[in-house]
Amino acid sequence: MMKPLIGQVLVALFLACSAQANENELTERAKRYQEGKLQPDEGVAMALLEGDETTFAAAGRLGKDRDLVDENTLFEIGSITKVFTGILLADQVQRGKASLDDPIAKHLPDSVLPKDSPLASVTLLDLATHTSGLPRLPGNLESEDLDPGDPYANYSVDDLHEYLKNFQETDFEERGKQSYSNLGVGLLGHILERISGMPYEALLTKTILAPLEMDSTFVQRAKGDLPKKSAGRFATGHSEGRETSHWHIDALCGAGAIVSSAADMAKFATAHWNESTPTELRAAMDLAMRETRNDMGLAWFHGDKGYWHNGGTGGFRSELKISPENRTAEIMLTNGAEPPQSTKVEGDFKKISGFWSGTLNANGVELRQFLRISESGQVVLHSLDQALQGIPSTSATFDGSTLTAEFPGIRAKFTGKFADDLLAGEFEQGVTLPLSLKRAEQLPPKLSEFLKQRIDGDISTINGFWSGMIGGKGGLFVILQIESVADAGEAWLYSPTQMPGALSVDQLKIEGRQLELKIETVHGSYEAEIDGKTMEGTWSQGAPMPLKLKWSKSRPEQK
């Protein structure tokens, strides 16, 4: 079983309304989104805020044979919870109960975090800005008690303490660099409980929910947390058109456990510029939005026109964008996590196949981008100044003049017109930025060396797609893609029913008929014996499970 995610780091905000949008226009946008992105039993609620005016729109249903969605429908908001956690931290700092530079060891028992722990120097600011080096999820999340449909429900504070107690230096990602961590902000929520002496949900209610009269919003830690009065308004989650369980997040609740409505989220957004917001809360909100590191506040991401965050749980997606300076905000909540996944490749890519390079200018920061385009139509994106691993497209079209490639794993899209060995266009991901790519003759040395370090052995005989079920028939469908690149290579693992993107394989070794691979982000590994067009072995991520894969030239769909 692959480890679940609470949302993604980067996202394109689908709601893009003009400042003069009226209710009819917003309703039409909601209708188009529901019809184009969601299934018939799924719905969307949107809100547009301009100064003192709030416009709501909705389309679709709470679930099969259920009522229509409206602004009072309840959705899991996933990682937008982190923004609330950032404000709670700011409030404790304003009250003098904590400092952003406090090491986390100051607020945890010695029995959990001894003085010689590699975590001793991690600070509260590190946790709030995803620069702690902590992995995305704790390595002991998966156990015999894991419920795949509700993966955080049985992860307790004792489990979290046990993980921290046994943490090793080698468990760190890169310290100081931004690496999105649900574990980090979940731990921050737990530490705030200890600082305040209150459960997270009580602290949230006292600090934010009650002052703003967000009466429908609650924290879903356990199955009994849903207020009876709210049961009829809580939407049914969906992923790939199938109903999902609601998620209950206990020890890591600060990372993604809030349930809210468009109406309540509008109150939250307005409070960032409303004169009636209590002074203490407004000061905490301002501190949380203040840039600290890497274009981030305390859990807020900084964009070119404001501040944003997104969220996702097993069956829900959420998006929030606020500009206090302009007194505007945009909100979108849906109970459809992902559409049925399929790949789409259309066109003849031969004349644009090869390597392409260019530079994005994001708020004055130059980020070098590198694209690999195959004759078969797969586009792979590398951000040379961020994570070097390739992000493969799942949709690419080329009509002879315009290339469009979508990267749902990071909710990004590139569109470029081809002329004279130049692809000139735009890169969309939260904001739209110009991006022009020129042909490149070879891989950049830094990228070439990176890819060589990840592959050990000759993979030319196993290039292609390998698919099968973890655990055998009825298990989790996965696809392993292996690709030679110049004199190096790269591999990814897809789990189409869990996420739209791919997990990059950190190490792949082939020796004779034996294959070994590791994926550090989910603490997973696979060892198998290759026999022609099949490989059979064991997937290890917690309890070992059998996994037999069959080869195909093109990416297969799940039957």
Image (cartoon, rainbow, N blue to C red):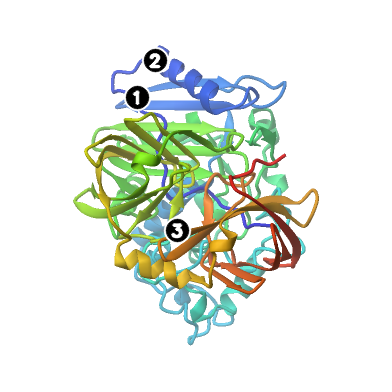
Q: Residue furthest top?
A: 24
Query: What is the x, y in percent for residue 292?
Result: 28, 59
Q: Amino acid at mark 2?
A: Glu
Q: Say whether residue 97 is visible.
A: no
Query: What residue appears at the point 47 percent right and 81 percent down from the top-left corner?
Result: 118
In the rendered image, which quarter is residue 276 located in?
top left
Query: What residue appears at the point 47 percent right and 77 percent down from the top-left corner?
Result: 119
Pick whichever of labels 3 and 2 is earlier in the sequence.
2
Q: Which residue is mark 1?
A: 17
Query: What is the x, y in percent for residue 512?
Result: 64, 74
Image position of 200 with respect to 14: above or below:
below
Q: Amino acid at mark 3?
A: Tyr
Q: Are marks 3 and 2 in contact (CB under 8 Å)?
A: no
State the CA–CA distance, disc 3 to disc 2: 35 Å
Q: Say whether residue 66 is visible.
A: yes
- Mark 1: secondary structure: loop
Q: Which residue is mark 2?
A: 25
Give the number of the disc on residue 180: 3
In the rendered image, which quarter is residue 389 located in?
bottom left
Q: Quadrant of the N terminus?
A: bottom right
